[in-house]
Every structure is written in C-alpha cells, then in structure tokens.
Amino acid sequence: MWSKIIGLLIGVMGIIYIFFIPGDPVSTKILFKLIPMLLIILFAFLQPVGESRKYKTLILIGLTVCMLADGLIYWFIVGLITFLIGHIWYIFAFKQIKQTSIPKWAIVLLLAYGFVMVIWLAGTLLSQGDTILAFAVIIYIAVILMMGWNAFQTANKFAIIGAILFIFSDSTLAINKFIVDVPFSDALIMISYYGAQFMFALSIHYSVSRKNLLK
C-alpha cells in the first residue's frame, strides 16, 4: 500500500516540478527537483530484496548519487561528473543480476547511437575548439553505452526500459545544450529522467517476481 501511495506522490511531485515551478529562484527550483528523487529512493528502499541484496544496495546508491547530480548540474561539469559516477553504480548493479548475453539488435542500436553521438556532439565541440569538453563527452557516451549494455544483459524489463529512458534523457540534454534547441526540452529531459529512475527502483521488485515464478 505504501509503495502505491509513494508511486502516486512521485508522479504528482514530478508534474508539479516540470510544469509549475518557475526557474527563479534557483534554490526553490532545485528543492522541488529533488523531491521526486527522494520519493523514488524511498520507493526503492521499500521494495523487497530480489536475487541479490547487493543489487538493491547498488541501485539505492546509484539513485542517491543521481539525486546529488540533479542539484549539481547547475554547475555543469560537476554535475556531469556526478551523473557519470551514478551510471557507474548502475553498471555495478546490473552486473549482479546478469542473466544472458546482449541481443544482437541491441548491440547494433547501442553502437550506432554511440557512433552518431560521438561524431555529432564531440565533433561539434572539437570544431569549436573545446577539446577538453569534447573528450569528457566521449567518455560520458562510452559510460552510458556500458550502462545500457549491462542493463540488456539482466533480462530485467524495468532495468532495460530505465536504461533506454536514461540514455534518451542524457542525449536530449546534450543535444539541447551543445547542438540545437530541442522543443519542450525541459519536459522531455525530466519526464524521461524521472521515468528512468523509477524503472530502476521497480527493477528491484521485478527480480523478486521472476525468482518466485521460477520456484
């Protein structure tokens, strides 16, 4: 029951932040941005342990690091590094429940995505003379590809959906910041971002259901 109530609150507070909280003052904006993540962390904490207690712990750490990154992203490089660390924690988590090899179609899509984003984003930054940021973007792309790669190997549908949403959110943010203005970018970025984190939280319960089914 509590999980359902918290799930509803996540949706309500996410909508309030995305559509009703103004950009100024920034402190208020950050506060309301963090509330859905705090609720997602609580939601994840209430999920029963699945095949690996360590998986739940690592997901909770990843969620917490990403929540910190939400506030730090206003200092872009610091926020970028913090999100990078969050992705690494998710990679560690997904390795705990690895079930299968990644499907060939997913390999093609992830590698194609990585190639296009490196050429488009890093290439643009290099052409502008911003070499350090270009290499930082390349590293970030490599890490989120690893995150997606490992998510597919879990055979956990919520982990996979979460990874795809996270990649979409990060990509939209980067394109909007460095390449071209994306219509409704704020809503697209945050809806997919909150959705990704909620899916990761749900993935804890899904592993329980799958384990019980196998029994």
Image (spheres, rainbow, N blue to C red):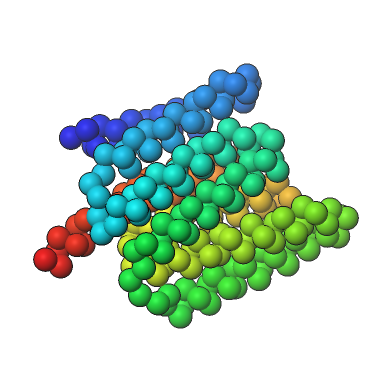
Image coords of residue 122 (percent x, y): 75, 61
- Residue extending farthest to the left is 215
Furthest toward the bottom, the residue is 104
68 vs 134: above or below: above
- Identity of the residue drawn at 72% across and 63% down: 120
State the residue in front, 90 or 164. 90
Image quadrant of residue 14?
A: top left
**Which residue occupies the foreground of this view, 84 or 167?**
84
Q: Residue at x 69, y 35 (%)?
A: 75
Q: Residue furthest front?
A: 54
- Residue at 66% x, 51% y: name it: 174
Residue 188 visible in the snapshot: no
Q: Quadrant of the C terminus?
A: bottom left
The location of residue 94, given as percent across then percent down, is 41, 61
Depth check: give the residue in front, 208 or 33: 208
- In the rendered view, tell whether residue 112 sits above or below residue 169: below
Q: How many marks?
A: 0
Residue at point 26%, 44% (across, down):
47
Residue 64 visible, this angle: yes
Look at the image and tell me in which quarter the N terminus lies. Answer: top left
- In the picture, measured across the screen, residue 115 lies left or right of residue 47, that is right
- Is 104 situated above or below 97? below
Residue 205, percent across and down?
25, 51
In the picture, residue 25 is in which quadrant? top right
